Image (spheres, rainbow, N blue to C red):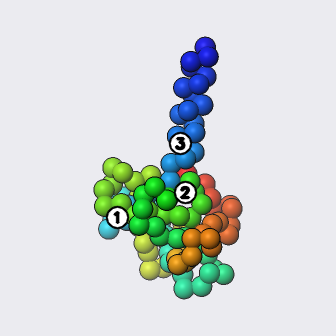
Amino acid sequence: MKKILITLVLALIGVAASGQVVYSTDYKSEAQVKVYVTKYKSEADLVVYKTTYKSEADANKGIWFFTNYKSEAKKKIWFTDYKSEADIVVYFTTYKSEAGWKKNSKKHMMY
C-alpha cells in the first residue's frame, strides 16, 4: 500500500512539473488549442515567454518551449490570424518574469 501511494505521488509530481512544451502545427484540425498573437499585453489571456531550453519550460505558467516533434509536445497549437477564431490570446514577452496568465478562466486550455 505504501509503495502504491509513493508511486502515485511521484507520478502526480511528474505531471505537475512537466513544462509547456508546445508544437506549432500547420493544420487547424491537428491543433488542441487555437492561438491568436496580439501586439498588446492588455489584450492577452496569457503572457508567454519563449525559452530556448526545454528544462526552463514551467508548468502552465506561460513559459513555452517550442519543439520540432509532435510526440514531445504537451500541447499542439495552431496560430490563427483572427482573434475571433482563437481559444486563447497570447502576448509574447522578452522577459521571463512577465510570463503568466491574465485570465485564469482560460488556464484549463493548456493543461
Say which label, 3 or 2, has the lower sequence index: 3
Q: Provide the secondary structure element on which disc 3 rests.
A: helix
Measure how far apart labels 3 and 1 are at the Cα level.
23 Å
Disc 2: CA contacts within 10 A as few (<14), some (14-19) or many (>=20): some
Amino acid type, label 2: Asp
Residue 94, position in %: x, y?
52, 78
Q: Residue furthest top?
A: 1
Q: Provide the secondary structure element on which disc 2 rests.
A: loop
Say which quarter of the image contains residue 102.
bottom right
Q: On residue 54, which mark appears?
A: none
Disc 1: CA contacts within 10 A as few (<14), some (14-19) or many (>=20): some
Q: Residue at x 42, y 58 (%)?
A: 54
The residue tagged 3 is: 15
Residue 5, position in %: x, y?
61, 22
Horizontal side, residue 88 vs residue 34: left or right: right
Residue 90, position in %: x, y?
55, 73
Q: On residue 58, which mark appears?
A: 2
Say which quarter of the image contains residue 48.
bottom right
Q: Residue furthest bottom?
A: 39
The residue tagged 1 is: 25
Comparing labels 3 and 2, the label whose residue is closer to the camera: 2
Residue 68, position in %: x, y?
31, 61
